[in-house]
């Protein structure tokens, strides 16, 4: 027991607004775990919404747990204290259910750290009826849960608000009937959207790809994702406020879910189908509520600039003496009014995502943004007096050549030309930041078959861009490291075998290089291999409502457009 760690948790709680505390008596206890630090988790709107929604259920007590901060690890080690929940400081192993909400693959190792520190066996096969049932949901999981299948008793495929209450009802019933863990899991397998990995067998061919994915009994062959038909039914807004998080001065409000555009690399677009907008009335209500907590409203969604009443929403926030924030805008939906609203809200930077430098490659990825849109957007932004622009580019996209890389440089220069010309007139000059990430082929998108580009080739392309733009005033280039893209691709496109690599990496303290040397599996097989168009993919059993034939056609069309 560490008094120091308990005091830290209590201090954190004392600085929060919106914490919910419930008595434990006769209720199902669920610990909602975020596989990253408190600072990161507390800005995650989905995590907050679930916390609030679950605590509205009378028979559930829901608390939170996070990966400890770096400076807390030595104290945990010294005292051998089990990782505990924030609200009641009870060890994770005391809960009935431990539910992870997992947005990113790169947090997978943190999951194992949390289980380890919570003194819960890592492997599901090593858990008994006395251990919590360990479940997971979140974007990463409903893209492809297979690399995590050794560690979880159950996955919830789809939008958590829809499936989790049904799962919990089943748990409650099973408990009152005295069912064992296995009997409970068998019961939940009948719930649409629930995937229990132990009830399925995966067979591999000698060459490595999957030969069969077979239910071990009368379980569904495919798991249908769950989605919320009416997103106005659930208020996806900030309910917890703390100074110790990224969006510490904002109330976040979801505007829409999914995106109607269909960019071929974009997982969010394909798994959050259909695209759903909130009604103006409900959105306004939530914004008014948000303004009672913070004066700044963060409008959330992948396609905020596609919201049909965006202008009205922005104006109403300003009329209520609030300010607003939007994370990223489509260049072709930028209007003078919208930029004026953002300027009035104190925005100093606007982010645009051309993704690719050339028109050809933007056609291949179906981005649908033209250079004229981009240049016009830059002009509007700088004219309005917003000094900085951030440009998101992806490198290593299918069919990309060095000419496309050169086009990133020349497009940036053309953008800079407008930026300087208009900015000088305005006597306001800021900076253009290029943010470059390697392309990660994501499951359930048309590019799911494409390989990740070789790390050395990505490094070379980054070098070209950096060398060309070195010394150019007002431009800064930042980028993700290709080696982390490699790991993300491995975890994103892996099958069950990748769980072994993950476990070994955990035992090696997160040292991937050492792990790859030791393990008897070739990670390149998952990362660099272009998948056969007709092979069984590890995530094929998930039914997102988008047919594989359609994705295949889209991929082939992209490749043929690349040849034009
Ligand atoms: S516009 Fe953005 S969110 Fe929409 S599909 Fe394209 S990349 Fe995804």
Image (cartoon, rainbow, N blue to C red):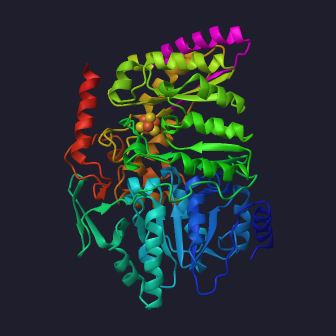
Residue at horizontal 49 percent and vertical 13 percent from the top:
410
Residue closer to the observer: 481 or 226: 226
Q: Position of residue 504 (x, y in %)?
A: 47, 60
Q: Position of residue 487 (x, y in %)?
A: 46, 46
Side of 559 where 431 appears, left or right: right
Query: Which region shows up in magenta?
Result: 408-436
Side of 168 where 244 appears, left or right: right
Tell me if residue 429 is in the magenta stretch.
yes
Residue at horizontal 20 percent and vertical 56 percent from the top:
205
Residue closer to the observer: 529 or 509: 529
Ligand 1: image quarter: top left
Q: Position of residue 21 (x, y in %)?
A: 69, 73
Is residue 176 in view from this perspective?
yes
Among the 4 quarters of the image, the one containing residue 118: bottom right
Tell me if residue 518 is in the magenta stretch.
no
**Mainly helix, strand or loop, the magenta region?**
helix
Residue at horizontal 69 percent and vertical 9 percent from the top:
424
Compared to 64, does 22 lie above or below? below
Q: Position of residue 553 (x, y in %)?
A: 22, 37
Among the 4 quarters of the image, the one containing residue 364: top left
Is residue 402 in view from this perspective?
no
Quadrant into which the N terminus falls? bottom right
Compared to 449, does 510 lie above or below? below
Quadrant into which the C terminus falls? top left
Residue at horizontal 67 percent and vertical 49 percent from the top:
288
Residue closer to the observer: 187 or 498: 187
């Amino acid at each position: 027991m560490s008094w120091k760690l308990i005091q830290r948790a209590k201090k954190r709680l004392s600085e929060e607004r919106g914490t919910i505390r419930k008595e434990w008596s006769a209720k199902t206890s669920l610990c909602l775990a975020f596989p990253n630090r408190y600072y990161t988790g507390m800005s995650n709107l989905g995590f907050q919404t679930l916390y609030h929604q679950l605590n509205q259920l009378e028979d559930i007590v829901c608390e939170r747990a996070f990966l400890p901060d770096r400076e807390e690890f030595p104290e945990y080690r010294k005292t051998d204290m089990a990782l505990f929940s924030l609200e009641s400081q009870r060890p994770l192993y005391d809960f009935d259910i431990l539910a992870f909400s997992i947005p990113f693959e790169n947090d997978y190792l943190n999951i194992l750290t949390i289980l380890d520190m919570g003194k819960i066996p890592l492997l599901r096969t090593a858990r008994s009826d006395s251990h919590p049932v360990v479940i997971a949901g979140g974007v990463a999981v409903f893209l492809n849960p297979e690399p995590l299948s050794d560690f979880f008793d159950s996955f919830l495929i789809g939008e958590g608000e829809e499936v989790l209450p049904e799962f919990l009802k089943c748990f409650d019933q099973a408990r009152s009937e005295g069912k064992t863990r296995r009997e409970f899991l068998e019961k939940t397998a009948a719930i649409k959207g629930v995937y229990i990995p132990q009830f399925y067998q995966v067979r591999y061919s000698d060459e490595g790809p999957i030969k069969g994915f077979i239910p071990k009994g009368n379980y569904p062959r495919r798991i249908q994702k769950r989605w919320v038909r009416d997103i106005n039914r659930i208020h996806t807004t900030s309910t917890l406020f703390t100074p110790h998080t990224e969006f510490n001065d904002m109330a976040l409000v979801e505007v829409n879910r999914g995106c109607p555009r269909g960019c071929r690399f974009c997982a969010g677009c394909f798994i959050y189908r259909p695209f759903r907008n909130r009604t103006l009335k409900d959105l306004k209500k939530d914004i008014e509520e948000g303004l009672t907590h913070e004066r700044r409203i963060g409008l959330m969604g992948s396609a905020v600039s596609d919201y049909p009443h965006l202008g009205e929403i922005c104006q109403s926030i300003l009329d209520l003496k609030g300010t607003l924030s939007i994370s990223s805008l489509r260049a072709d939906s930028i209007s003078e009014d919208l930029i004026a609203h953002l300027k009035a809200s104190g925005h100093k930077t606007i982010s645009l995502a051309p993704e690719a430098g050339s028109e050809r490659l933007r056609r291949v990825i179906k981005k649908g943004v033209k250079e004229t849109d981009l240049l016009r957007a830059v002009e509007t932004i700088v004219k309005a007096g917003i000094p900085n622009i951030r440009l998101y580019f992806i490198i290593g996209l299918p069919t990309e050549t060095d000419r496309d890389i050169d086009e990133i440089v020349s497009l940036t220069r053309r953008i800079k030309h407008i930026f300087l010309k208009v900015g000088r007139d305005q006597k306001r000059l800021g900076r253009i930041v290029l943010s470059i990430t390697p392309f990660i082929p994501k499951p359930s998108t048309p590019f799911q078959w494409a390989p990740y580009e070789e790390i050395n080739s990505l490094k070379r392309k980054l070098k070209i861009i950096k060398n060309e733009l070195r010394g150019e005033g007002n431009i800064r280039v930042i980028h993700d490291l290709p080696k982390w893209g490699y790991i993300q691709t491995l975890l994103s496109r892996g099958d069950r075998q990748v769980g072994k690599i993950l476990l070994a990496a955990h035992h090696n303290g997160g040292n991937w290089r050492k792990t790859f040397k030791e393990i008897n599996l070739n990670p390149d097989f998952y990362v660099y291999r272009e998948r056969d168009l007709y092979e069984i993919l590890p995530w094929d059993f998930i039914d997102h409502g988008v047919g594989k034939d359609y994705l295949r056609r889209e991929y082939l069309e992209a490749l043929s457009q690349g040849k034009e």
